[in-house]
Image (cartoon, helix red, strand yellow):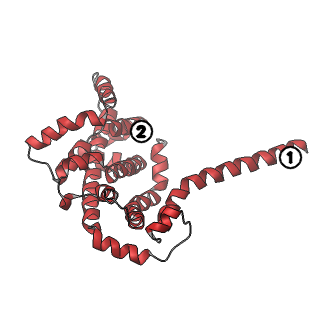
Amino acid sequence: MKSFSYSHHLNIVKIAFVLVVCLFSVFPFYFMIIGATNKSVDIIKGKLTIGSYLIGNIKAMHQTVHMGRAFWNSLRSTVIGTFLSIFVCSAAGYGFCVFRDKYKDRLMGILLLSMMIPGAATMIPLFRMFSSLKLLNTVAAFIFPSISTAFLIFFFRQNSSSFPIELVQAARVDGLNEFQIYLRVYLPIMSPTFAAASIVTFMGLWNNYMWPLVVLQTQDMQTLPLLVTGLTAGYVTDYGLLMLCLCIMTIPIIILFFTQQRKFVEGITGSVK
């Protein structure tokens, strides 16, 4: 009886702990959504209930910022960048998995060593390079530095360690070239890994702030992180407008994560279908 009582109390403590952690995790999103419906003065006071000023914040957004243009700039650059990054890094991961070479482990070691270099240390050389190529203030300048990353190559390489090489050998016997094997064999089997990598890459590019701030120099090329940051640059900040813009900025990430959540978990754990 005492054992049952102790186990029961322990379960209650665990559930209470999980609920508290969930509350702390969800509260910022709740406050952001609630803030989008309230005036700035109410947000400053800490109002936690739904307000009636959503239409006013929407009108202020249309009058103050070019949300549609910034949204399109972010979406275009992020989608293109994600596609190119996943293709290049997955192809590299496929190569590390399938091809036999005595130097590939050394090459992977060099790639992993490059992860130790802070991103800020590479900004000046990258800026000078893109400036000499006359690519500043272009989509290419936003995308190119993120096309190939050591983390994603390592991620694909590690998850590909459980990939059945026998399928590649059988496909070669059937007359498929390497690109066809990549598309018809490797990609379908590794789809959870592709989903996880796509979500991580999309989030990184969508929320990227520092590099676009350096290379995107006009408002016509402004992305959502730059637009949202600009709302806090004045003497007075309209927090209702800020919360509304943050809600809009969060929507694509939420949609992507919840539609690919299952494959994301499978990809992170390294499972192969």
Quadrant the N terminus occupies: top right
**Sequence-wise, which precedes: disc 1 or disc 2?**
1
Circle 1 SS class: helix
Q: Decide: is 38 above or below 110.
A: below
Answer whether residue 175 is visible to the viewer in this image: no
The image quarter containing residue 40 is: bottom left
In the current view of this chain or complex, which residue is farthest to the right?
A: 1
Q: x, y percentage for residue 130?
A: 13, 43
Q: Which residue is mark 1?
A: 5
Q: Residues within 10 Å of mark 2 (few under 14, many from 20)?
A: many
Tell me: 46 left or right of 88.
right
**Observer-nearest residue: 45 or 75?**
45
* Number of the label disc, if any, that sits on residue 124: none
Q: Decide: is 231 above or below 265.
A: below
**Which amino acid type is shown beneath numbered disc 1?**
Ser
Q: Decide: is 228 above or below 9.
A: below
Q: Residues within 10 Å of mark 1 (few under 14, many from 20)?
A: few
Q: x, y percentage for residue 102?
A: 29, 21
Q: x, y percentage for residue 207?
A: 35, 52
Q: Which residue is mark 2?
A: 159
Answer whether residue 265 is visible to the viewer in this image: yes
CA separation in Å, label 1 and label 2: 44 Å
